[in-house]
Image (cartoon, grey):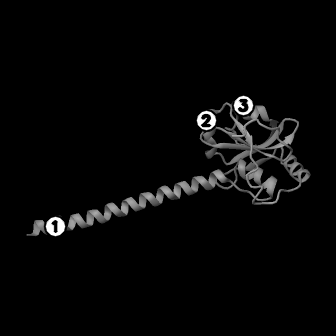
């Protein structure tokens, strides 16, 4: 992982590893990031930060990267640079600063911190971790449905054999 290997440039996306999820911010220069933070989102929140799934509002904050990351690892991750054109840095910074202090709607699935920063950088709100969670959930659901179908078929086959034996 490219943690701490190079200094971020203005407009870079910063991925912060919180254990069971990632928090995202956008680097705005001189050691500062802007990020969308639900009330439970801070570096030492630990498992409590998972409570952000219950929040419907979050505040756009400008804080020092080292304070937002705390003891958690982070890296520069401009994850969609090969898929989308990057907006001009001055526009990214202008728009990020315009949101400062605002309380925005927050939804883990449609409007989280990753959606916020990817919309600033690319003009398109995306969340890879939500997509992965949905794909995993669909995969688990499909596997459970397949297992259920096999068990139901087995019960029908063996159940009918037992019924035939009893009727003889």
46 sits to left or right of 42:
left
Q: Secondary structure at mark 2?
A: helix
Check disc 2 and report the residue beneath it.
48
Question: Distance of mark 3 from mark 2, alpha carbons?
Answer: 15 Å
Could you say which is closer to the camera, residue 95 or residue 107?
95
Q: Quadrant of residue 7?
A: top right
Q: Considering only order in the chain, which callout, 1 or 3, is on the residue closer to the N terminus?
A: 3
Residue 41 in the image, given as x and y percentages of width and height? 69, 38
Question: Distance of mark 1 from mark 2, alpha carbons?
Answer: 54 Å
Compared with residue 6, is residue 161 higher up or lower down, i.e. above or below? below
Q: Secondary structure at mark 3?
A: loop
**Which mark is in front, 3 or 2?**
3
Q: Quadrant of the N terminus?
A: top right
Check disc 3 and report the residue beneath it.
70
Instruction: Classify 10 Å Cα crowding around label 3: few (below 14), some (14-19), many (20 and above).
Output: some
Residue 133 in the image, given as x and y percentages of width and height? 58, 52
Question: Distance of mark 3 from mark 1, alpha carbons?
Answer: 65 Å
Q: Secondary structure at mark 1?
A: helix
Say which mark, if any, is on residue 58. Answer: none
Residue 110 in the image, given as x and y percentages of width and height? 67, 56
Q: Considering only order in the chain, which callout, 2 or 3, is on the residue closer to the N terminus?
A: 2
Q: Quadrant of the C terminus?
A: bottom left
Residue at image coords 88%, 48%: 93
Residue at image coords 37%, 60%: 148
Q: Quadrant of residue 155?
A: bottom left
**Which mark is in front, 1 or 2?**
1
Check disc 1 and report the residue beneath it.
163
């Amino acid at each position: 992982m490219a943690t701490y290997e190079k200094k971020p440039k203005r407009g870079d996306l910063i991925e912060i590893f919180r254990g069971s999820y990632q928090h995202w911010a956008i680097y705005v220069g001189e050691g500062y990031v802007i990020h969308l933070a639900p009330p439970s989102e801070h570096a030492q929140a630990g498992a409590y930060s998972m409570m952000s799934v219950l929040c419907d509002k979050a505040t756009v904050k400008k804080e020092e990267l080292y304070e937002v990351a705390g003891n958690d690892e982070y890296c520069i991750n401009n994850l969609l640079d090969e898929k989308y054109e990057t907006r001009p840095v001055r526009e990214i910074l202008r728009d990020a600063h315009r949101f400062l202090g605002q309380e925005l709607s927050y939804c883990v699935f449609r409007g989280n911190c990753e959606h916020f920063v990817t919309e600033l950088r690319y003009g398109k709100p995306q969340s890879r971790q939500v997509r992965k969670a949905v794909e995993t959930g669909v995969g688990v659901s499909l596997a459970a449905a397949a297992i259920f179908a096999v068990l139901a078929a087995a019960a029908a086959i063996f159940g009918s054999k037992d019924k035939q034996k009893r009727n003889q």
